[in-house]
Image (spheres, coloured by chain):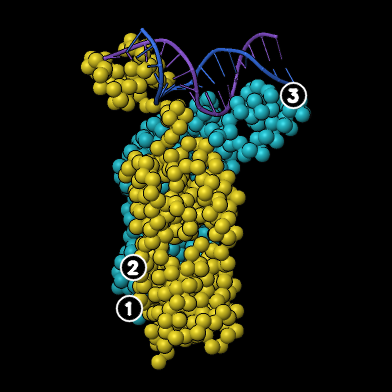
Chain colours: A cyan, B yellow, C blue, D purple
Amino acid sequence: MKLTMRKIAEMVGVSVTTVSLVLNDKNVRITKDKKRQIKEVARKYNYVPNSSAVSLAKNQSNTIGVVVPNINNPFYSALIKAISDDLAEIGYYALTINTDDNHKNESKQIAQLVNRGVDGILLVPTNDLYAQGQDVADDFLKHIQIPFVLVNADSELAINQVNLDSFEGGYLATQALVDNSHRHIAIVTGNKGYVNAENRLNGYKQALGDNGIPFDDGLVFRSDYDVNGGYDIIEKIEKNPKITAIFFCNDLMLYGAIKRTNEQKKNLFDLYSVVGYDDSYFNEVLNPTITSIRQDVAELGRRSVQILRRQLEGKKRPINEKLQVSLIKRQSIKSLS
Amino acid sequence: MKLTMRKIAEMVGVSVTTVSLVLNDKNVRITKDKKRQIKEVARKYNYVPNSSAVSLAKNQSNTIGVVVPNINNPFYSALIKAISDDLAEIGYYALTINTDDNHKNESKQIAQLVNRGVDGILLVPTNDLYAQGQDVADDFLKHIQIPFVLVNADSELAINQVNLDSFEGGYLATQALVDNSHRHIAIVTGNKGYVNAENRLNGYKQALGDNGIPFDDGLVFRSDYDVNGGYDIIEKIEKNPKITAIFFCNDLMLYGAIKRTNEQKKNLFDLYSVVGYDDSYFNEVLNPTITSIRQDVAELGRRSVQILRRQLEGKKRPINEKLQVSLIKRQSIKSLS
DNA sequence: TTGAAAGCGTTACCAA
DNA sequence: TTGGTAACGCTTTCAA
């Protein structure tokens, strides 16, 4: 049998109001003794409020929709973990939705979430959406009718958004290579339109420019942000003998490249100096260990939640935040000089 | 302004009951005309039922709680993905909850889920629970008051459960090593009481026995199912010079061992033949590639959902299912002969 | 310091 | 074929 406030009230011999007040720490002006008794009974019989009832009464669901392209990607799963934990701390459930990086899906799912009455949404948009152009993306975002925060992507709109500084990441990675006298540096970035891919590329360009190295379009390679993406692209890179270093904009791609060269009985690291992106734990397992850009996913989750909460509390002015990234130096860069 | 049933009722000039009946396609015996009008208004003003109210009234929610130790673990995240997809297909939301492998948490979260009115639970239990003994675990499970399926664990109770055949996994892995003339095979399994750890160990024992190799308790090493677990344990293994092969009951542990030996300027694979467990994609990135036990996570998710659904539909007789695993042969076993 | 009672939006039982 | 109304469990206002 489930314990309700009414039952507690009966057991202690007070009104439901009193129980509600006490259990929500609302009203301090309740007799110490009654208070104690109520809390005692609640604890003893393990009282848990019925959240449907709370939602109905307060007209909020205490649920946040968390929309991500793919739970399976370690970057997203780490983000979800961070978000869920932070959300739980402030009394919200995370209702996580996979879009499979498909915008149609994304659009449909968000509509459902809204209908279901979630209080807000944390949206990590699909690459599929951004690949259709920033204007299409912005137009889509403009039509979301409930509080939401755009996570891990940019928009020109005056909406709440948090992103990691991909420009800086691209810059730091490239600079690390340049510092070791590399001048012919390939960059393997996401396919055209990928969220954040252009920023990393721009950081790369800027770093080259700042060091007086001319940008060569032929050194830009594009592929999917996954193992197969790297697996497929490495042979194209090998065709250009001038290249001495590669900046992989995603660790998974790097792993794919390793896999491919191993299969060819070659060692990627004999061929190239390398920098990765995301700082996966696997970077410490490989030999050599991988120098990589670390993104603070936990912080990204935390800020997303904070900003959404702020919006939920009625703050109007939108926040646009860019989180710092850092270079983790390991062994995968050899000096050319 | 949100549209409610009452408002529709007023607009059309009928009772709330009628509206509810029509909108839920409950009662065909409503005047065609009224029916049409109600549906018309609902569609026109985009009526969406308040799900808190529905949940409260029906005491159910079209939501299934999915309780896992840790989203971040690739095995669990793959499972969640599979489950969410399957659940979505039959019209349910997955409300995923992290227990951080802490039983107190698990217990609290389940209680919350129940009070929140989820219709059922897919429970991947914590190791923390099972470490307290099968009887404690069973006792806990016995007290879950809503439909649920025990996933990826065993229970003696007559409850719905699906698990992967860990005994078979342990057997296959060990046999593969024995087939290559290894006789001093270390096993690195989970800490005492870990879910499925004993089964893998028993499979190992059985395989040894079937090949006339005496079981040596000194070859059993225990640690956490993660990278650090393997990192910490490898030095202990190195103290026994007889050991020529290691069966890691979890790929992450294997990675930790690689990391540690690399740091010592040694190569794990020069020292030992190795079999892993879970068949992570990294296994193909490493050199040599790793022979490992593959578990069909997608199938595990699918069956979990099917069995829960069956229970939700009122079927009483519990199902206890064991899913097959297989050995994926790669390069990490060298023949001793 | 406390309690009664009116919601919150639905569902479902019982009458009409 | 319909409608009144009591739940569902909680919050909140107003009175006492």
Instruction: Say whether residue B269 is left or right of residue B132.
Output: left
In the image, residue B255 above or below residue A279: below
Q: Amino acid at mark 2?
A: Tyr
Q: CA distance from mark 3 to mark 2?
A: 68 Å
Whether residue B50 is visible, yes or no, is: yes
Around disc 1, counting alpha carbons within 10 Å, would you say few (fewer than 14), some (14 to 19), or many (20 or more)? few
In the image, residue B192 above or below residue B213: above
Image position, residue A21 (x, y; %): 66, 26
Q: Amino acid at mark 1?
A: Gln
- Dot 3 or dot 1, earlier in sequence: 3
**Which residue is the site of mark 2?**
A231
Q: Which label sits on residue A29?
A: 3
Front-most of residues A261 and A154: A261
The reply to whether discs 1 and 2 touch (Cβ–Cβ < 8 Å) is no
Mark 3 vs mark 1: in front: 3
Q: Secondary structure at mark 1?
A: loop
Around disc 3, counting alpha carbons within 10 Å, would you say few (fewer than 14), some (14 to 19), or many (20 or more)? few
Q: Amino acid at mark 3?
A: Arg
Q: Which label sits on residue A264?
A: 1
Q: Chain of mark 3?
A: A
Q: Secondary structure at mark 2?
A: helix
Q: Which label sits on residue A245?
A: none
Q: Chain of mark 1?
A: A
Q: Chain of mark 2?
A: A
Residues at marks 3 and 2, common chain?
yes
